[in-house]
Image (tube, helix red, strand yellow):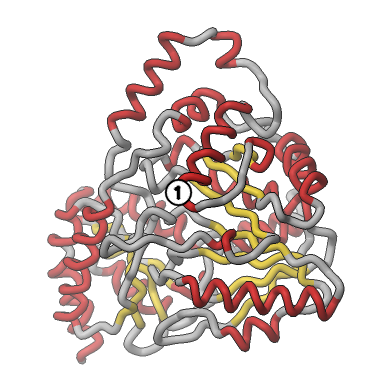
């Protein structure tokens, strides 16, 4: 018999994954080309060619025992140093290899960090809308999720509400920018305001509050702009990164944690993260892909591809008369359900073979998420279905 905790998790399993599985079923009935699956943030772009080249070089030229054997739980030291050097060059940080813990994607890294810092009952603050799996990650270690309410229409953090959410039990804050699901980008002013609020709370309660910055979309910012690096504005910052989006390597499960050298209890924290990597069963991040990404740190996918898809989808929403948030990055369009019922809208959309995700699972009722990391043809061919959906609401 399964545990009660898992029973609840299965019952409330991710709406994103549920829609993805539904899409596969519909594709067998109607044909994949006639199902418009906007459910999963699965990159449609191929990985840069240099990834395949780097993998081949490692396989052809390596010491097989060294490549395929165990290494430190935190990962290969030279790979970690290469990542530290890259971050320092790009953002002016002061990392070295001791600050980097290689992880099984950003999700693995976030779980490693939370395992390292949470005691039962500790609070983790998130700002709605937020990636729904954060709730499960915090529950894994018997923490308590504290949700700052959403702040429409901009969906930028309400700093006063954020301040009120911080208590003596706050152990960590998770932010995600560019944001999944809104596509909103937090600028320097916002990051500084959040940092000031956390410093004030630390002083008030005599505690340490860590900022866990979830950054899988860091390079996916539109209009030639860049995402400000949160660790520059707050000393107790840990960056969780994944190469899933920037290099289209979602299935390879490779990422890292970057611990600010100014973090409180730095040595204990990185040591705990290394041990957590082992005791959670990861042991270490996959060795071959560690080596490959270390050679591709200056590579990226074409962000313009996603920006163009977003513009095409916005044009369709405009024809439909649907309200949406202007995406500044990532590859999601956040659309308001006309009647305020996001679940009903997604159910109606499915009748037109449109797979969308209700934002109730992101802590924001009344909105839906459309992932446009799909083929341009999927966006173009979906127009008729979206218009028919709009007609239903017009009636």
Q: Is residue 152 above or below residue 363?
A: below
Q: Is residue 289 above or below residue 223?
A: above
Q: Is residue 180 visible?
A: no
Tell me the quarter of the picture where residue 159 sits: bottom right
Tell me the quarter of the picture where residue 120 sits: bottom right
Helix, strand or loop status at disc 1: helix
Residue at horizontal 54 percent and vertical 76 percent from the top: 128
Q: Judge from the rendering whether residue 85 lies leftward or rightward of residue 118; answer left or right.
A: left
Residue at horizontal 71 percent and vertical 62 percent from the top: 210
Residue 147: image x %, image y %?
63, 77
- Residue sitting nearer the eye, 301 or 354: 301
Residue 323: image x %, image y %?
29, 84
Q: Judge from the rendering whether residue 186 lies leftward or rightward of residue 10; answer left or right.
A: left
Residue 253: image x %, image y %?
51, 39
- Residue sitting nearer the eye, 281 or 165: 165
Badge 1 density bin: few <14, some 14–19, many ≥20, Cα 10 Å = few
Residue at horizontal 86 percent and vertical 73 percent from the top: 206
Residue at horizontal 63 percent and vertical 39 percent from the top: 96
Image quadrant holding the C terminus, namely bottom left
Residue 317: image x %, image y %?
21, 77
- State how many labels appear: 1
Q: Judge from the rendering whether residue 180 lies leftward or rightward of residue 323; answer left or right.
A: right
- Residue sitting nearer the eye, 238 or 35: 238
Q: Disc 1 marks which residue?
A: 90
Q: Is residue 125 visible?
A: yes
Q: Judge from the rendering whether residue 122 lies leftward or rightward of residue 158; answer left or right.
A: right
């Amino acid at each position: 018999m399964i545990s009660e905790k898992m029973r609840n998790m299965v019952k409330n399993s991710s709406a994103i994954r549920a829609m993805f599985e539904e899409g596969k079923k519909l594709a067998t009935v109607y044909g994949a080309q006639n199902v418009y699956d906007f459910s999963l943030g699965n990159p449609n772009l191929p990985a840069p060619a240099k990834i395949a080249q780097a993998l081949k070089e490692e396989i052809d030229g390596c010491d097989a025992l060294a490549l395929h054997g165990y290494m430190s739980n935190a990962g290969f030291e030279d790979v970690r140093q290469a990542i530290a050097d890259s971050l320092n060059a790009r953002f002016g940080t002061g990392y070295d290899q001791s600050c980097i813990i290689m992880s099984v994607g950003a999700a693995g890294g976030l779980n490693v960090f939370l395992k390292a810092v949470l005691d039962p009952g500790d609070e983790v603050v998130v700002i709605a809308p937020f990636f729904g799996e954060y709730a499960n990650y915090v529950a894994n270690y018997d923490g308590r999720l504290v949700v700052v309410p959403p702040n429409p229409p901009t969906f930028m953090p309400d700093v006063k509400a954020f301040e009120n959410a911080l208590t003596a039990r706050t152990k960590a804050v998770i932010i995600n920018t560019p944001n999944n699901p809104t596509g909103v980008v937090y600028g320097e002013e916002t990051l500084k305001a959040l940092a000031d609020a956390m410093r004030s709370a630390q002083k008030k309660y005599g505690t340490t509050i860590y900022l866990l910055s979830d950054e899988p979309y860091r390079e996916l910012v539109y209009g030639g702009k860049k995402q400000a690096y949160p660790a520059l504005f707050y000393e107790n910052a840990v960056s969780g990164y994944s190469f899933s989006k920037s290099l289209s390597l979602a299935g390879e499960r490779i990422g890292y944690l970057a611990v600010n050298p100014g973090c409180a209890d730095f040595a204990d924290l990185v040591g705990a993260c290394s041990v957590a990597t082992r005791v959670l069963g990861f042991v270490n991040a996959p060795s071959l892909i560690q080596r490959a990404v270390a050679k591709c740190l200056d590579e990226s996918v074409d962000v313009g591809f996603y920006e163009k898809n977003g513009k095409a989808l916005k044009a369709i929403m405009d024809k439909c008369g649907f309200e949406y948030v202007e995406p500044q990055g990532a590859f999601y369009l956040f659309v308001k359900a006309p009647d305020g019922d996001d679940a009903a809208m997604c159910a109606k959309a499915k009748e037109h073979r449109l797979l969308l995700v209700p934002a109730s699972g992101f802590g924001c009722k009344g909105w839906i998420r459309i992932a446009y990391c799909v083929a341009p043809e999927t966006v173009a061919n979906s127009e008729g279905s979206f218009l028919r959906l709009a007609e239903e609401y017009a009636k």
